[in-house]
Image (cartoon, rainbow, N blue to C red):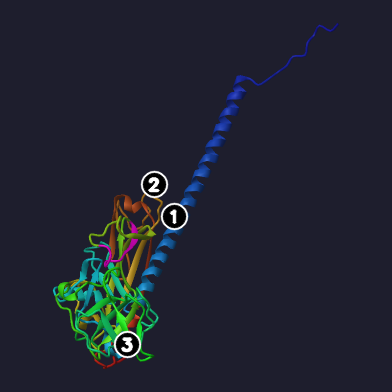
Amino acid sequence: MNKHRTRQRGLSLVEIMVGLVIGLITVMVIGQVAAEFEGQKRTSTGGGDAQSNGAAALFQLEREIRMAGYGLMIGSWGQMCPLGINIYYNGTVVSDPGANPADSGILAPVRIIDGGGDNADTIVMVRADSPTGIMPTTIIKDMPNTSSEIRVNWGAGMREGQQFLVGARDGSKICTLMQLSQDPQPVQAGAEFDMQHNPGQFPYNPANPNNVFTDAPTYGIGDVMINLSSLSYWRYSVLCNQLTLVDPSRTAAPYTCTNTQPLVDQVVNAQARYGVAPAGSLTVNEWVEPTGLWAANTLTAAQVSRILAVRLAVLARSPQMEKEDVETTCNGGNGSVTLWAGGPTVALSGDECRYRYKVFETVVPIRNSIWGCGQAGVPCSP
């Protein structure tokens, strides 16, 4: 019997330690590569998010600006209601230009409310939401201002619950916003219709306009009615790093993140300027800031008719905060972003320099102001 046994050899302690060191180094390298890749991916994704959010915000604002004033600028008449609109909603007077002439600002297709300094501007737009908004119907029977019935020469394609404006053809009366309380009632087939605007379940109709508005005009033969379907009255502002939306006729100020509707995330600023033409012209020759004589609460009907375009810039940022300053203009934690050549800048400081930013800028014509820029039948010259 062989007494010699085969000796079994394993790894020594030194070999095990060398293997562990190599494994740890490999894990560290793989981790660093993965972390670097993930950082680059997050940076690229964040930049894409800023690109998408900025483009979406600009598209939304541009679309509304292009449609602004529809139904309120009627062909060669110009502004339908240059003196303003009496608006009542659900027990509250929203606009009473007879008491406060600044309320007529609601009639500007576009109003820019300056944010002060490099704070974001607010843009307010108003328009009709009806295919027949540019086709007025004529009042054919005098009505006292306490009446809940208007007789017109056609039904304007209206239905119960829709809103409409009543005013003078030459713009000499304050307009009134009303709500149809039943379908148009034919008096004479195809020629005469009664438009009822009773209060009660219809929140835009006060029981007696004389008790609500400082100036409740009497409308009569020759005055006009415009089918709005509904009055689209929108206030766009930047709150809590979001583009937000609210209807000021239904929601009272002050406006915050909680009482406005968020539309687009990571929008941190918006700036706008009026494109102004000389009186009676269609050629924009000046860009003005919405301050001083051009402030939102001091605009006159003459000024509104000269505003034919808006220059608009939106600043969006990546949701990803980097470890170090990445905005190229930043130096020592301070920098700025220019929104257009020779235009406004937005200051950056502290952690704001650690985000990536995208600027979107365009010029938007206010089409309905251009089509209706004439007054009292006098067309605008090119």
Identify the residue at image location x=33%, y=53%.
353
Mark found first going from the N terminus, 3 or 2: 3
Does residue 307 lie above or below 268 as drawn? below
Q: Which type of secondary structure does the marked residue at label 2 adopt?
A: loop
Q: CA distance from mark 1 to mark 3?
A: 52 Å
Q: Does 245 appear in magenta?
A: yes
Q: Position of residue 203 (x, y in %)?
A: 28, 69
State the residue position of label 3: 137
Does residue 27 lie above or below 329 as drawn? above
Q: Tell me if mark 1 has few (under 14), some (14-19) or many (20+) residues whose alpha carbon lies within 10 angstroms of its own.
A: many
Residue 78, quarter of picture: bottom left
State the residue position of label 1: 46
> Which residues, given as a range, are shown in magenta?
241-251
State the residue position of label 2: 323
Mark found first going from the N terminus, 2 or 1: 1
Q: CA distance from mark 2 to mark 1?
A: 14 Å
The kind of residue tagged 2 is: Lys
Frontmost residue, 189 versus 9: 189
Frontmost residue, 298 versus 154: 154
